[in-house]
Image (cartoon, helix red, strand yellow):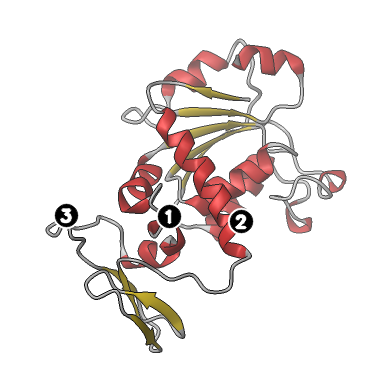
Amino acid sequence: MIIMTRRFRDIYSLLTTSVFYLILVAVTTTTPIQGFVTTHPSVTVTTAATGQRRQRRDSRHLYLLATKDDSNRRTSLSHDEVARYSRHLVLADVGVKGQERLRDAAILVIGAGGLGSPALLYLAAAGVGHVGIVDADVVDASNLQRQVIHGTSTVGRSKCESAAQRMQDLNPHVQVRLYQEEFTSATALRILGDGFSPQKSYDVVIDGSDNFPTKYLIK
């Protein structure tokens, strides 16, 4: 269950689009890239200026070409981010503006178990810039067959710390805030009210909890 906390339903739309295309791109072999020049080895691209397909073989960075409609616009994404999110940037539903909005978004995930684990991994992979994690539990060996963000090396550690470590390894551009406590009537208003930081409220709350009292509280 996902609760929208402000006026950012479009962020949820971007996230669902991102996850869908991550799966779609994974099963494709060659994707023409519209509007970019790349020096990644053996990547076929289509330039916006000429529409001609070219091969580039020296691997460095993927650079954004000016578009016809916005020739003076510069992206605030770094070279590493452009290379990392290149499959998003070529999608009309995401693009540079969408990726920047994902980077600026803040999402709270309640529970880092069987439901929260894949959500946290995809949020990090998609480039959501600020993620809060609420979980008071520790990793147990019995968790590992379904709670995929955790590993053997983190058994006995806090689930929050284990999840944050895996997310940072997956995408170091993501900032993570940990709440190593239960989400209860005594803590809910403080966690939600504080936001990711004093300047950044949570835009979306994802319910990854495993009990009905917490689910009703979130709702």
Q: Residue at x 59, y 11 (%)?
A: 186
Kind of element beneath mark 1: loop
Q: Which badge, 1 or 3, comes first in the chain's sequence?
A: 3
Q: Residue furthest left?
A: 72
Q: Position of residue 197 (x, y in %)?
A: 38, 31
Q: Position of residue 210 (x, y in %)?
A: 76, 26
Q: Position of residue 72 (x, y in %)?
A: 12, 58
Front position in the image: 149 or 82: 82
Image quarter hosting the C terminus: top right
Q: Residue under circle 1?
A: 173
Q: Residue under circle 3?
A: 70
Image quarter hosting the N terminus: top right
* C-beta proximity under 8 Å, tags 2 and 1: no
Front position in the image: 48 or 214: 48
Q: Residue under circle 2?
A: 23
Q: CA distance from mark 1 to mark 3?
A: 26 Å
Q: Which badge, 2 or 1, comes first in the chain's sequence?
A: 2
Q: Residue at x 40, y 89 (%)?
A: 57
Q: Is residue 185 left or right of residue 96?
A: right
